[in-house]
Structures are given as structure tokens and as C-alpha cells.
Image (cartoon, rainbow, N blue to C red):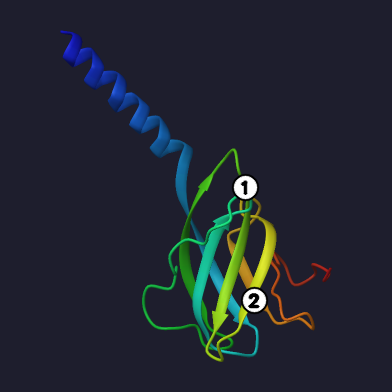
Amino acid sequence: MKNILAVLVLSLALLSTAYSQDKHEYTVTNKSGVTVVGVYASPASKNTWGSNLITKGKIKNGGTYKIQVPVDASNCTWDIKYHDSKGKDHVMTNVNLCNSTALNLEKQKTKTAKLTKHKSMKKK
């Protein structure tokens, strides 16, 4: 009986974790002027990047690609890095992934990218 109870408690804990960290789908639009070969996401509080979210091919300039990020509702702030075909990394910091399902990669003078939800959103 104790074993059954322990299995039930463990199962509930695992289900709770699974529901609190859902994978959200985002449409990445490449407006950077270069071909993107890698997109990575990391919670802003961490110092490590996850796996490349581009699982097939690359994102040509003007192209789109769907990625999934395991966003935790209690931590919406993420850093996004993209790697271009010329070997350069571009980083978007403190991106709120709970506010949008679209990420626009845009090259800036500082060679970093930023999140834009709408065309009317101003650059920082």
C-alpha cells in the first residue's frame, strides 16, 4: 500500500512539473539580412544556452521557422541567441516570451537582435 501511495505522489509531482513548463510555439521571422543557422534559448537567470532550436535546415533572410521553447509561466524572461552563416552570434536579452508568439530577428548597429511583437513597436 505504501508503494502504491509513493507511486501516486511521484506521478502527481511529475505531472505538475510537466504542466508548469509547457512548450510554447513561436514563429521566428528572419529580418537580419543574413542566413540564420542556429537559434538558442536560455532562461535569463541561467548562464547556459540550450540546444539549437532549428532542427532542420536554416532560416534564409525573409524566411520563417517555427520553434518550441519550454516556457515556465513563473519565468517568462528569456535570452535568445541566433547564429548566422557568417559565424557571428547575435543576442536578444530579457525577452518576455509570455507576451507574444512571434520573434523577429533584426540586425541592429550593435549587431544584436531584438524581439518585436508588432511592426509598430519602436527600437530600443
Q: In this view, does 5 lie above or below 76?
A: above
> Could you tell me the amino acid type at mark 1?
Cys
Marks 2,1: beta carbons within 8 A: no
Label count reads 2
Q: In this view, does 84 lie above or below 3?
A: below
Badge nearest the viewer, 2 or 1: 2
Q: How far apart are the alpha carbons under marks 2 and 1? A: 20 Å
Q: Callout 1 environment at 10 Å: few (<14), some (14 to 19), or many (20+)?
A: some
| SS at badge 1 | loop
User: Considering only order in the chain, which callout, 1 or 2, is on the residue closer to the N terminus?
Assistant: 1
Nearer-the-camera pick, 101 or 95:
95
Residue 54 quadrant? bottom left
The residue tagged 2 is 90
Q: In this view, does 108 lie above or below 9?
A: below
Apparent side of residue 36 relative to residue 5 in the rendered image (left or right)? right
Location of the C terminus (image quadrant): bottom right
Nearer-the-camera pick, 28 or 49:
49
The residue tagged 1 is 76
